[in-house]
Structures are given as structure tokens and as C-alpha cells.
Image: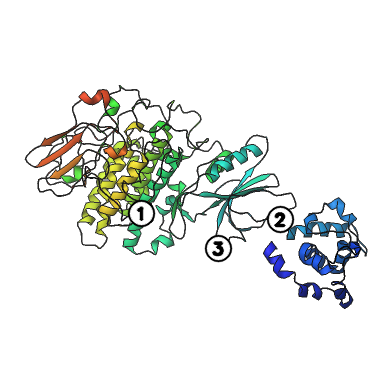
């Protein structure tokens, strides 16, 4: 039990005080104060009731409640607490006292001086202060120095918080107090339902402590290996809808992060968490994250997971190419053999290397994370790393893992598939490279397999077949997200708009969990995410512009239709005019079976590249809708 102000007020009543005094002492409660000299009509009881309830409780603990009269005669009150250990001798005791008694009084007083952590607060607790929280469990496996645990606050019943412990000081591996406050101030400005967010902080005994909410029970890395009970207990259709909603929520939250000029910096399965209520959220962005604290204590550790899911430019400098090469077709396929069976269709990931970013429409920003735990100290990176584009790449990898989970493909099998070309005969040797950025060709073939599996389920008779209609168009945008060149990737906003339409128009999820309006502060976009949607909890307000084709999925100028006008899963390769980029030249290509709208690749005005011929597209008459077939090699 914690002695907060409401409890003290409710406990120390006149009846309570009388129950701890002798009869003659009870009569003294209504006498005028001795030190008043007739100038006040206040009584001893009124002084206790208004000014000395904590003092009376301390005396009750020490077994001498009748000493309250002497303390009042010397004008002691609760506002004088805490009393320093060397000042307790000044208290007017009528009985015997010793050093042990003084020590007991000194320690007991802190039980009645509880200061709760409130949302947004930062409290400096003194050495003997009692911190009002209860440790639920410690997770020593998470960090080598037990820097993370889970706690409860008495003023927030039913909530569990993640607590981080940061050593303060001036030595190596320590945070100065000013540095700690700086990180706290950064953290408290980032609040989102799908992001581990700051609750409060305090310092005590040479450590800084930060409480975050919500506390996670699971992460996607564990989900991909073993299905936890909260997810396993769901109906199959509900579970599949949940995963698609998770994908959209993650895209929506990345929009929020990027709209504030920040970046996450380390998106991977273990940094995406969910709790027993199946709410998904990213880990926080700062140096106060549990992983950052763990890496700070073991700087020699290599984080293979971060490497596997990192964008290529975070690990090596891309080969410099001409300005025209990076404007190559982002996703649009070119002619491929019409005799290829549908199973051979491949999703094409752009291999082009962008320039320094002068043609990219992304708004310049300063990366939020001052510490990138996945950046090795010996690696040379690009001089102008677009941290937001790197986030998009990593999120694309995670989405691909979730789609594999939807189709019951094991993450272990996916990793083995990515590393297949690096395996050498014999035993021993280095661990094969299973990263996404080094195995683009293998990733493409895996995506083709997922599309094939989804097509079978989509055309089946199951009640949840609508969910599988969203797999192919999701794979299309993932292919763009995994482009080798940062400038060829869509923005988080484009991805979110695409996924919103996938959920509402293909998966039959009419009201996705997240519908927000985020502004980026730079004027590059200010309408509701998804275009025409209002903020709220539902998605029924979506409006399609007159100049936007329903098959466009909000991504720009590539559209494929059969001659009967049936819908396809083709997505565009450039933003629509609503994205506030200048419109791109387009052309129409016709044959006996198809009418195709094609545009120049890129996400803004092609400028000097406008003279280059557009890439034609083709779809096999008997193939799966939405397969983009490339005339170029699909492997690295």
C-alpha cells in the first residue's frame, strides 16, 4: 500500500486520532493552541487535521502518538518534512530518545511523502525517497545489465510499463544528466498509438529511469517462429484480417514518424512489438531504447537481424551511375516471353542506383536517431543517407515476412531461400548471407511463390478468400519499397495510401484500424492520408478523384486492363497529381488483347529524362492478374 495524499486524508480522521490517544489526551484535542497566547482560536485537532496528518502517522508507527502535542507547541507541521537526520534532535521529545529512534523517524517519514509519476513528468528523487512502483518482472535475457524491466504504478492500476535504466555520470558508457534530459525531451515529443511512447522519467541513486507505454508481451520475430496464444486463439479469418490491419497500421505510423521529420532507423521483426490485446507498435526511436542500451553495454556484438533487414545504402556505398539510370522504370515490367507459365512470373525490384538525391521529391530532414545500432563502425555509407528511404526498405522486408506468415511459409525457410546462392559445399565457414539487400533475386522468386499461393486461396471457396486478393497488390508495392536505389522507393505516405486501398477495396476490410491525417511540416503534403479520407477510426469516407482511375490504387500512372474492362491488380509506378509532384508524360500502348497506360519511371517530373521512351508493359493472357513481367534478368 502506498500512502498518497488521498489515502492519508481518508485515514487520519478524528476517530482515528482518538483511537491512538488516552482519554485525557483526547480531551486536549479541543483546547486552544498553547503558543497562540490568546491570539488564535485554533485547536490541536484543527492543527492535526489541517497541517500534521503525516506527522501523526509517523508517531503512530514509532509508538508515541501522544508526542504530537509537543510538536504542535513548537509549530512543526507536514510542510517541514522531510527532516534531515541531523535536525531530528531539535524535535521536542518528552521521553527518552537515541540515535536508533532518530534513524527510525528519518526513514519512516518517507513512507508518507510519496510522489507519484504522472504522465510527462520528470522527477528528481532524493537518496532516501521511496519510489512508488512495483516491479512486475525482470527480463535479464534482454540486456546483459538488467537495464529493462516491467513495472506497475499505483496511480495507474491495470497498466504495465516498460522501464529502462540508464547509468548517469561522466565516464565511458555513461550518460551525463544533461544528455539524459536531452534524450527525454526528444522522446516525450513522439506519441502515437502504434509507437512505444514516453510516459515519465525520474533519477535516483545515480541512474536515470524512463517509463514507456505500452509494455510489449511479444514481438514479430517470436510470432514468425511460434504462434502466441492471443493470436492463436483468434478465428482464422479474424487473424488474417488482423495481420493485414497490422501492415496498414505500421505504414500509417511510419507516416507519422516521417511527417515530423524523423526516422525510425532500425525496423526489423524484433523492433515491432504487440501485446496480449494484439495491438501492434514500433519500439521507440531514441538512444533510450532497450536494444540501444544493450548494444551500448556490448559494442562488439554484431546484430545480424539489423543487417538482414537494413537497406543496402546503410551498409555499403552504391556504385555511382549516370543520372539517367536511376530514373529507370520503378516497377513497370517490359516484354517477356508469352509462353512462360504463370508460375514463372516474377516481381521485378529496381536495381538502379539513384544520385545524391537532387531529383528525389523527398523533403530533406534530419534523422531523428543519433545512434544507429545497426551501422557498423568500419562501414562507409553514402554521404547523404536518406534515413526515411531506409525505413521504407526495412518496412518492406517486414511486410514480406508478414505476407509469408499469412500464407504459412516459415521465416526460417525464407531466410534459407535468400541465402541459397551463398551456400558452399562442405562444412564450416561463415554463416551464409541471408540479408534482403544482398539477395534481391531470391526475394523476387519468393514473392512470385507467395503470389502463386495467394492466387490459389483467392480463387478457392473459403470465407476468408477476400484477404488473399490483397496479397498480389501488396507485393507490388513491396517490390518498389525494396528498390536498391533510395530515390526509387515510394514514400511512407504513398505506401500507406496504397495499403489503405488494398484493405478497403481488395481485402474487404471497410474500416481499417488507422485513419489519420499527418502533415510533414514541410509543405510537401497536407491532405488526409489516402486522399479524401477524414480523420477518425473508420475508413468509410474514402473519395476517389475524378481524374483517378479505380485501378490506380493511388500510386500513379501505370494501369492495365483487359479488353472486357475487368479490374487488375496492376499498380502505378509514379504518384498521381494529388501527391503534389508534377505529372509525368504518359502514353497508351494497344494490342489485340490489352490497352496499357505507361509512364516514365520516377516519383517526380522526369525533367531532362523526358526524352527517353517509356517502358511498355505486357500481361500474359492466361497469367495471374497483376504479375509484372520484366524483360530483364530478375536476379542479381
Residue position for label 1? 245
- In the image, what residue occupies the spot 21% across and 33% down? 599
Residue topped by disc 3: 158
* Residue 280: image tag: none
Dot 1: element: helix
Image coordinates for residue 39, horizontal then vertical, percent:
88, 62
Of labels 1 and 3, earlier in sequence is 3
**Quadrant placement of the N terminus:** bottom right
Q: Which residue sits at x=37%, y=49%?
A: 411
The spot of residue 592 in percent (x, y) is 6, 40
Local crowd at mark 3 within 10 Å, few (<14), some, or many (≥20)? few
| Picture colour scheme | rainbow
Magenta stretch, residue numbers = 539-547
Residue at mark 2: 130
Determine the CA span between mark 2 and mark 1.
43 Å
Q: CA distance from mark 3 to mark 2?
A: 21 Å
Residue 1 visible to an observer of this rendering: no
Using a 10 Å C-alpha cutoff, classify the residue at mark 2 as few (fewer than 14 neighbours), some (14 to 19) or many (20 or more).
some
| Residue at image location 39% in from the left, 54% down from the top | 536
Label 2: which secondary element = loop
Image-based side of 327 in relation to 376, left or right: left
How far apart are the alpha carbons under marks 1 and 3? Answer: 26 Å
Amino acid at each position: 500500500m502506498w500512502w498518497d495524499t488521498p489515502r492519508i486524508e481518508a485515514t487520519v480522521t478524528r476517530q482515528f486520532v482518538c483511537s491512538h490517544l488516552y482519554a485525557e489526551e483526547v480531551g486536549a484535542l479541543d483546547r486552544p493552541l498553547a503558543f497562540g497566547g490568546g491570539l488564535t482560536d485554533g485547536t490541536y485537532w484543527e492543527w492535526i487535521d489541517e497541517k500534521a496528518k503525516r506527522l501523526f502517522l509517523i508517531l503512530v508507527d514509532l509508538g508515541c502518538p501522544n508526542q504530537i502535542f509537543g510538536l504542535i507547541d513548537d509549530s512543526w507541521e507536514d510542510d517541514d518534512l522531510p527532516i534531515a537526520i541531523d535536525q531530528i534532535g531539535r524535535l521536542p521529545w518528552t521521553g527518552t530518545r537515541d540515535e536508533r529512534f532518530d534513524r527510525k523517524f528519518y526513514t519512516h517519514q518517507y513512507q508518507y511523502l510519496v510522489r507519484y509519476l504522472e504522465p510527462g513528468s520528470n522527477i528528481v528523487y532524493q537518496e532516501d525517497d521511496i519510489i512508488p512502483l512495483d516491479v512486475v518482472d525482470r527480463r535479464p535475457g534482454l540486456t546483459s545489465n538488467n537495464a529493462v524491466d516491467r513495472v506497475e504504478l499505483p496511480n495507474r492500476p491495470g497498466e504495465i510499463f516498460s522501464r529502462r535504466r540508464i547509468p548517469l555520470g561522466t565516464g565511458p558508457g555513461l550518460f551525463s544528466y544533461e544528455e539524459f534530459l536531452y534524450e527525454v525531451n526528444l522522446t516525450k515529443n513522439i506519441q502515437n498509438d502504434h509507437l512505444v511512447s514516453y510516459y515519465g522519467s525520474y533519477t535516483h541513486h545515480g541512474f536515470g529511469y524512463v517509463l514507456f507505454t505500452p509494455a510489449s508481451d511479444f514481438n514479430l520475430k517470436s510470432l514468425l517462429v511460434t504462434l502466441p496464444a492471443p493470436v492463436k486463439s483468434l478465428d482464422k479469418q479474424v487473424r488474417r484480417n488482423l495481420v493485414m490491419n497490422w501492415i496498414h497500421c505500421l505504414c500509417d505510423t511510419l507516416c507519422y514518424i516521417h511527417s515530423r521529420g524523423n526516422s525510425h532507423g532500425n525496423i526489423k521483426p524484433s523492433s515491432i512489438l504487440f501485446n496480449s490485446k494484439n495491438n501492434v507498435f514500433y519500439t521507440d526511436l531514441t538512444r533510450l531504447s532497450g536494444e540501444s542500451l544493450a548494444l551500448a553495454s556490448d559494442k562488439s556484438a554484431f546484430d545480424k537481424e539489423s543487417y538482414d533487414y537494413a537497406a543496402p545504402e546503410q551498409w555499403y556505398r552504391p556504385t555511382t551511375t549516370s543520372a539517367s539510370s536511376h530514373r529507370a522504370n520503378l516497377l513497370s515490367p517490359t516484354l517477356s516471353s508469352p509462353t512462360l507459365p504463370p508460375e514463372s512470373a516474377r516481381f521485378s525490384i529496381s536495381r538502379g542506383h539513384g544520385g545524391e538525391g537532387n531529383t528525389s521529391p523527398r523533403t530533406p530532414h534530419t534523422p531523428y536517431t543519433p545512434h544507429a545500432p545497426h551501422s557498423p563502425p568500419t562501414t562507409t555509407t553514402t554521404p547523404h543517407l536518406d534515413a526515411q528511404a531506409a525505413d521504407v526498405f526495412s518496412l518492406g522486408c517486414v511486410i514480406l515476412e508478414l505476407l509469408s506468415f499469412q500464407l504459412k511459409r516459415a521465416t526460417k525457410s525464407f531466410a534459407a531461400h535468400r541465402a541459397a546462392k551463398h551456400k558452399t559445399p562442405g562444412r564450416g565457414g561463415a554463416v551464409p548471407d541471408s540479408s534482403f539487400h544482398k539477395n534481391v533475386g531470391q526475394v523476387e522468386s519468393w514473392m512470385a511463390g507467395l503470389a502463386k499461393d495467394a492466387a490459389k486461396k483467392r480463387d478457392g471457396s473459403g470465407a476468408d478468400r477476400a484477404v488473399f486478393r490483397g496479397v498480389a497488390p501488396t507485393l507490388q508495392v513491396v517490390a518498389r519499397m525494396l528498390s536498391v536505389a533510395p530515390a526509387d522507393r515510394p514514400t511512407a505516405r504513398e505506401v500507406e495510401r496504397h495499403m489503405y486501398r488494398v484493405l478497403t477495396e481488395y481485402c474487404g476490410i471497410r474500416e481499417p484500424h488507422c485513419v489519420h491525417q499527418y502533415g510533414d511540416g514541410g509543405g510537401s503534403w497536407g491532405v488526409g492520408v489516402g486522399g479524401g479520407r477524414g480523420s477518425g477510426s473508420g475508413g468509410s469516407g474514402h473519395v476517389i478523384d475524378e481524374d483517378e482511375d479505380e485501378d490506380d490504387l493511388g500510386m500513379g500512372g501505370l494501369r492495365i486492363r483487359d479488353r472486357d474492362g475487368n479490374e487488375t491488380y496492376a499498380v502505378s509506378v509514379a504518384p498521381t497529381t494529388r501527391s503534389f509532384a508534377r505529372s509525368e508524360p504518359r502514353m497508351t500502348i494497344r494490342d489485340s488483347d490489352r490497352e496499357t497506360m505507361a509512364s516514365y519511371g520516377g516519383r517526380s517530373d522526369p525533367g531532362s529524362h523526358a526524352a527517353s521512351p517509356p517502358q511498355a508493359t505486357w500481361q500474359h493472357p492466361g497469367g495471374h492478374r497483376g504479375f509484372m513481367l520484366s524483360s530483364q534478368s530478375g536476379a542479381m
